[in-house]
Image (tube, rainbow, N blue to C red):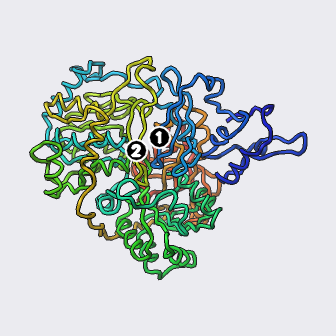
C-alpha cells in the first residue's frame, strides 16, 4: 500500500477504519497543524489483514495498491460481481478486468455477509491464476514416462481406459475449494462412472467422528437449506460465543470483524479454547480458556457440567447458557478424538447453537454435494438403501455402490499399499494432507493417476493424465458459505474477452470423461447440475445420530519434549497466494511459542531460535515467550519450508523435541522460518 501525500485531505477515514473496525492502530495522523499527515510510526509496518480496505474507502485516491498502481484507468475496466474463493465466508467481491486479465478486486457491499469489507487475501490473492506455468492443454504420459501435450480426445481416451480398468477400485480426492456444482459432479461421477463411495473432500486432518458430526449437525442445515442455523447477523447479536478449534482472524476474517464489532457495540463476550490468546481474540475482547492440544474434550465436558472450572471457565459456562449463545466449531477439532462428540454434549447442556466453520470456501458445499464416503447429495446416508434408491432413480441408474467408502487417509493408505488401482485427484496439495510423505508414496505407487488442476503440482508431476481446468474468475458456479447461504456467481472472464482458450470447469471435464467411459453423466453445463441439485433437495426423515466418540489418553511429554500445537496463518505459503509479492510481504512474522517456564527449562529465551524436531526433520523459528500451558509448543503450520507436517513428520497433538537451534552449515536439511 502506497501513499501520495499531496492528495491526502486528512479526512481520517483510513485511521478510523484501522482503529475502530480492524483493531490495527498502526496508521495514524502524525504531527499537528500544517505539518499533519497520515503515516506509521518510525520503523512500524502497517501489519493488518485488512489494509486494502483503506485504499477502497479513501475518497481522493491518496492510498493506492502497489500491485495495481498505474496499471490501468478505472474507465478501461470491465467490472463483474463475484464471490471470494479463499475462506468459507462467502464475501461479495467486484472483479475488475481488462482484455481477459483480472487487474484488481474490490469489496462489494453486502450488508448480510461482509458488509463493505474484504480481507487482504481476498482482495489481492487472485494472481495465482495468471502465473506463467498455468496449465492450458491436457498432458498424457508417453511410453518413455514423460508428460507431453495431447489433444482433448486423446487425453480423454487415455484417462477413460485407465479408469475403466480400475472401476470399483478408484479413489477420488476433491479438495475443499470446489464450487457446489463441481463437487456434485465428482460425487456423481464417483458413484455412477467409477462404482465407488471412496470420495472425500477433506485434504486436511479429519476423522470418522467428524464425518458423523457433519452428517448429524451440518448437512441439510443452514440459511438456504432448512431456513435455520447461525448467520452473520445472529452471530453478531449473540451475547456469548465460544470458539473451539477455530481462530477467527486467521481462518475466517469476516467472522472476526463481526465478533470485534459485536464486542465494541454491545459487549459480546467471546471465549476461545486454544493454546494461547491470539491477536484476533485479543482485538475482539475475548477471553482465553487455555487448552493444551487434546484437552479440548475435557474442557468441553467441564463447561457442560459447570464443575471443575476456574473463574474464567465458570464465567464462560454461565455466559453460554444465555439465550442466543453460539458455539463455533472449526475444522481443526477433528484432530482431537472425542472433541466433536463433547461439543455436541456441551451445546445440549448449555442451550447454545452449534455452527461449523471450515477454512476453505468449498467445504460447506462439498458436504451438501455428497463428496464424502458416508454421504450422498443432500445429506443422505450412503449406507441407507432407501436413500440410494432415491438418488439412483433420479440419476437414471439401476443401483449405487452400497459399501461404506474410504476417507482421505484410508484412500491414501489403500493407494500406497496397492489396494486401489487408480486415483482421481482435483486441486489437492500433498502438503495439506495429514501425512504428506505417505501421500507422495501413494501417488508414486498407484497404478493410474488422473489430475484436474490449474498449475503444476506434486500430483500433476506424477499423473498419467492431466486436465487443465478453469479458475474461479473463468467460470460460473456457487459457493455455499458457512451459514449455508448460497453464493452464486457468473464468470467474470468471458471467452470472447480472452487471448487464450479458456479451460473447462471440473464438471465439464467429468462430463466429457464420462462420455469417453460410455457413461451418461448428464451434466453438460451449470444449469444441468443446478437442476439436479434442486430436484434432489435435502434428506427427508430427519438428521443422522450425533457422534459418540470417546476421548483418548493424552501424550505425556518427557524431558526436552512438548506437545505440538499450531494452525495455518491467513497469509502463509499457500499456492493461492502466489504471484503477489506485495501481499507476501505483509505476512505476519512466523514465530514459535512456549510458556516462560518451558522456555527456561529448554534453555531458550524470547527472540532465540528454537528447533522443533519431529520423526523426519527439524524446523527452526524465532521464539516468542507467551502465556500458555507448559510443555506445549505452538508453530505456524505452513509458513516455512514445505510446512511443519511435511518437514518434521509431526502433527498437532503429537510429541516433538524442542531445544536451542544449533549453528548448522548452509546445506543442512533443517528448515528455518
Q: Quadrant of the C terminus?
A: top right
Give the spatial CA distance, label 2 vs label 1. Answer: 8 Å
Percent x, y of residue 556: 42, 68
The residue indicated by pointer 1 is: 83
Which of disc 1 and disc 2 is earlier in sequence? 1
Q: Is residue 146 above or below residue 669?
A: above
Percent x, y of residue 581: 58, 32
Would you say residue 629 is visible in this rendering?
no
Q: Observer-nearest residue: 202 or 143?
A: 202
The residue indicated by pointer 2 is: 479
Tell me whether circle 2 and circle 1 mark residues in contact (CB < 8 Å). yes
Q: Residue at x 41, y 70 (%)?
A: 297
Would you say residue 593 is visible in this rendering?
yes
Residue 140, quarter of picture: top left
Residue 600, label in figure = none
- Residue furthest to the left in view is 398
On the rendered structure, is 499 left or right of 166? right
Residue 60, quarter of picture: top right
Q: Observer-nearest residue: 429 or 218?
A: 218
Q: Quadrant of the N terminus?
A: top right
Element class at badge 2: strand
Element class at badge 1: strand
Q: Observer-nearest residue: 292 or 76?
A: 76
Crowd rating for badge 2 (residues with CA inside 10 Å; few <14, some 14–19, many 20+): many
Q: Observer-nearest residue: 296 or 160?
A: 160
Percent x, y of residue 476: 39, 34
Q: Is residue 495 above or below residue 665?
A: above
Q: Is residue 362 above or below residue 628?
A: above
Q: Is residue 277 above or below residue 164?
A: below
Percent x, y of residue 620: 54, 48
Amino acid at each position: 500500500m502506497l501513499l501520495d501525500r499531496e492528495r491526502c485531505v486528512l479526512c481520517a477515514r483510513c485511521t478510523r477504519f484501522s482503529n475502530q473496525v480492524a483493531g490495527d492502530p498502526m496508521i495514524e495522523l502524525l504531527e499537528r497543524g500544517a505539518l499533519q499527515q497520515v503515516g506509521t510510526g518510525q520503523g512500524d509496518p502497517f501489519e493488518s489483514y485488512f489494509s486494502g480496505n483503506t485504499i477502497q474507502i479513501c475518497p481522493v485516491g491518496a492510498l493506492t495498491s502497489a500491485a495495481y498502481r498505474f496499471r490501468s484507468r478505472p474507465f478501461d475496466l470491465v467490472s463483474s460481481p463475484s464471490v471470494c474463493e479463499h475462506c468459507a465466508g462467502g464475501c461479495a467481491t467486484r472483479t475488475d478486468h481488462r482484455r481477459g486479465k483480472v487487474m484488481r478486486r474490490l469489496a462489494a457491499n453486502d450488508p448480510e455477509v461482509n458488509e463493505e469489507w474484504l480481507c487482504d487475501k481476498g482482495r489481492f490473492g487472485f494472481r495465482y491464476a495468471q502465473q506463467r506455468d498455468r496449465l492450458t492443454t491436457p498432458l498424457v504420459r508417453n511410453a518413455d514416462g514423460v508428460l507431453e501435450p495431447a489433444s482433448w480426445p486423446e487425453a480423454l481416451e487415455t484417462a477413460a481406459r485407465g479408469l475403466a480398468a480400475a472401476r470399483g477400485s478408484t479413489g477420488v480426492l476433491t479438495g475443499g475449494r470446489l464450487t457446489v456444482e463441481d463437487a456434485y459432479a465428482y460425487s456423481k461421477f464417483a458413484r455412477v462412472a467409477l462404482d465407488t463411495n471412496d470420495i472425500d473432500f477433506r485434504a486436511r486432518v479429519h476423522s470418522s467422528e467428524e464425518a458423523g458430526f457433519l452428517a448429524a449437525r451440518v448437512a441439510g442445515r443452514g440459511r438456504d437449506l432448512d431456513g435455520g442455523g447461525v448467520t452473520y447477523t445472529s452471530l453478531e447479536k449473540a451475547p456469548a460465543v465460544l470458539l473451539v478449534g477455530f481462530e477467527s482472524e486467521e481462518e475466517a476474517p469476516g467472522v472476526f470483524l463481526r465478533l470485534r464489532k459485536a464486542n465494541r457495540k454491545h459487549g459480546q463476550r467471546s471465549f476461545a479454547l486454544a493454546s494461547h490468546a491470539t491477536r484476533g481474540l485479543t482485538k475482539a475482547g475475548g477471553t482465553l480458556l487455555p487448552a493444551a492440544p487434546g484437552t479440548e474434550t475435557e474442557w468441553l465436558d467441564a463447561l457442560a457440567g459447570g464443575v471443575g472450572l476456574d473463574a474464567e471457565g465458570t464465567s464462560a459456562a454461565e455466559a453460554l447458557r444465555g439465550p442466543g449463545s453460539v458455539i463455533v466449531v472449526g475444522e481443526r477439532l477433528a484432530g482431537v478424538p472425542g472433541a466433536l462428540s463433547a461439543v455436541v454434549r456441551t451445546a445440549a447442556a448449555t442451550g447454545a447453537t452449534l455452527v461449523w466453520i471450515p477454512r476453505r470456501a468449498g467445504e460447506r458445499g462439498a458436504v451438501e454435494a455428497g463428496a464424502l464416503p458416508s454421504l450422498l447429495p443432500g445429506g443422505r446416508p450412503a449406507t441407507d438403501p432407501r436413500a440410494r434408491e432415491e438418488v439412483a432413480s433420479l440419476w437414471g441408474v439401476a443401483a449405487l455402490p452400497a459399501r461404506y467408502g474410504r476417507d482421505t487417509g484410508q484412500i491414501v493408505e489403500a493407494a500406497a499399499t496397492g489396494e486401489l488401482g487408480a486415483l482421481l485427484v482435483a486441486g489437492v496439495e500433498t502438503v495439506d494432507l495429514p501425512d504428506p510423505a505417505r501421500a507422495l508414496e501413494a501417488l508414486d505407487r498407484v497404478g493410474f493417476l488422473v489430475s484436474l488442476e490449474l498449475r503444476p503440482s506434486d500430483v500433476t508431476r506424477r499423473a498419467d493424465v492431466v486436465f487443465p481446468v478453469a479458475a474461479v474468475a473463468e467460470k460460473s458456479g456457487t459457493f455455499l458459505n458457512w451459514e449455508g447461504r448460497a453464493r452464486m456467481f457468473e464468470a467474470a472472464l468471458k471467452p470472447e474477452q480472452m487471448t487464450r482458450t479458456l479451460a473447462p470447469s471440473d464438471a465439464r471435464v467429468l462430463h466429457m470423461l464420462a462420455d469417453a467411459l460410455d457413461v451418461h453423466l448428464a451434466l453438460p453445463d451449470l444449469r444441468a447440475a443446478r437442476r439436479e441439485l434442486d430436484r434432489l433437495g435435502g434428506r427427508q426423515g430427519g438428521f443422522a445420530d450425533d457422534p459418540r466418540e470417546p476421548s483418548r489418553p493424552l501424550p505425556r511429554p518427557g524431558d526436552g519434549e512438548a506437545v505440538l500445537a499450531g494452525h495455518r496463518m491467513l497469509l502463509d505459503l499457500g499456492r493461492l497466494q502466489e504471484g503477489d509479492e506485495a501481499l507476501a510481504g505483509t505476512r505476519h512474522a512466523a514465530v514459535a511459542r512456549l510458556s516462560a517456564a518451558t522456555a527456561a527449562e529448554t534453555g531458550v529465551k524470547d527472540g532465540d531460535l528454537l528447533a522443533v524436531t519431529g520423526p523426519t526433520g527439524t524446523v527452526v523459528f524465532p521464539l516468542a515467550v507467551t502465556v500458555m500451558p507448559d510443555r506445549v509448543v505452538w508453530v505456524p503450520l505452513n509458513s516455512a519450508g514445505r510446512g511443519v507436517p511435511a518437514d518434521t513428520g509431526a502433527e498437532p497433538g503429537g510429541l516433538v523435541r524442542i531445544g536451542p537451534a544449533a549453528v548448522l552449515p548452509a546445506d543442512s536439511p533443517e528448515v528455518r522460518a
